[in-house]
Amino acid sequence: MKLSDRVKRILSFSAGTMSLLLCWSCAYWVAKSIYDATSTMPPEYARQLITSFFGIFLFGCGMFFITKIKWVRNHQDNILNPMIHAMKMMAEGNFNIDLSYYRDQFKGRGRDHPYFKIIESIDHMAGRLGEMEEMRQEFISNVSHEIQSPLTSISGFAHALKHENLTSKERKRYLGIIEMESNRLSKLSENLLKLTTLESDYVSYEQKTYRLDHQLRRIILANEPQWTEKELNMDISLAPLTITADGDLMEQVWINLLTNSIKFTPREGTITVRAFKLANNQLIVTIKDTGIGMSDDTRMHIFERFYKADSSRNRNSEGNGLGLSIVKKIVDLHKGLIQVKSELGKGTEISVTLPIVE
């Protein structure tokens, strides 16, 4: 703190103390004059109470009149008006405010100064609200883009079906495309609802103890038509593992990861699934493929909502970009860790580490 600021504080404290003593003295002499004029003398305790209350009253009146002085009011307005204006701007949705000039004025008086704390809090709140507004606008833009594409296809092929000279084969193909795009919209809606639920502060999930290796084996067998159609080699090694978790949510994790590996692994490739217990009361599940892999830039962003990279270079080109976001949320909800190792043209390995809750 600067020397001048310390002197100002000492002078302000001294002035306040002197004002209080002056008001108290005035109260004492006024009360004494009244006692002498009326020839009454209350008990000592009563005299002290009367003097105290009267002194406080005089001090309050003095402070009230001081605040009415023009230069004092102007000083207060110069401090409070920018803060009031900033809060009005935030109420109208404008979070691009700058109170750094006023914050610097009080910074020299110490970070404990009330006005400095208020200005700093307003700046912090505006910054966080601005970030949330950008995320909201980006989310709406992404959702609108994802919805617009299938709606355009549905509208176009529905219009084409109105032509009477269509062959039965063409009509069937158009109806198939409409059905596929409708399913895509339904999946998008379902994933958005699931992601919103997982991101809420009051996520309710039912934990139960079950055999994880049985769950993984069941999911692999349920996807057999997909990996047999591409003639993929499935290398499975699952140790007997018991876990306490929400079975339905964890099933969503394994389905998303396995279907991604199947989707991006070329014909006659290999998918390796391993599950075993670690030494620190944890277990790990790895799903590795010999697919097209991902670049380092894609790998850093694959868990972001709606993230899609160049379809000609990586595995994150299909779907609506929500599947891996949901996987990450579910793993985080179970206090787990998900890691990705990938290289373009050499495949991808995703590892999920989970605590074994007794």
Image (cartoon, rainbow, N blue to C red):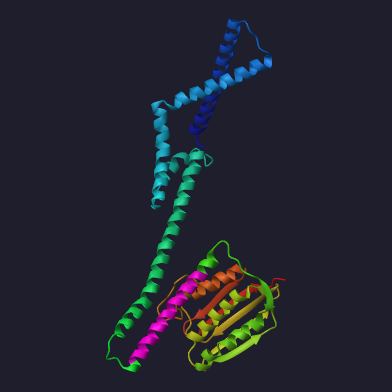
Q: In this view, does 60 lie to the left or right of 93?
A: right
Q: Which of 250 and 102 is in front in this view?
A: 250
Residue 116 point in image, percent of width and height: 49, 41
Segment tinted magenta in the rendering: 170-194
Q: Is residue 218 above or below residue 332?
A: below
Q: Which residue is drawn at 52% across and 37% down?
A: 1
Q: For the view shown, which residue lies furthest in the right direction?
A: 358
Q: Residue at x 42, y 46 (%)?
A: 87
Q: Residue at x 52, y 71 (%)?
A: 194
Q: Image quadrant of residue 214? A: bottom right
Q: Is residue 302 visible?
A: no
Compared to 274, does 21 lie above or below? above
Q: Where in the figure is residue 284, as x and y percent of width and height?
A: 64, 77
Residue 48 visible within the image: yes
Question: Which residue shows up at 54% across the image and 74% down it?
Answer: 327
Measured as percent of width and height from the top left, residue 317 is found at 43, 79
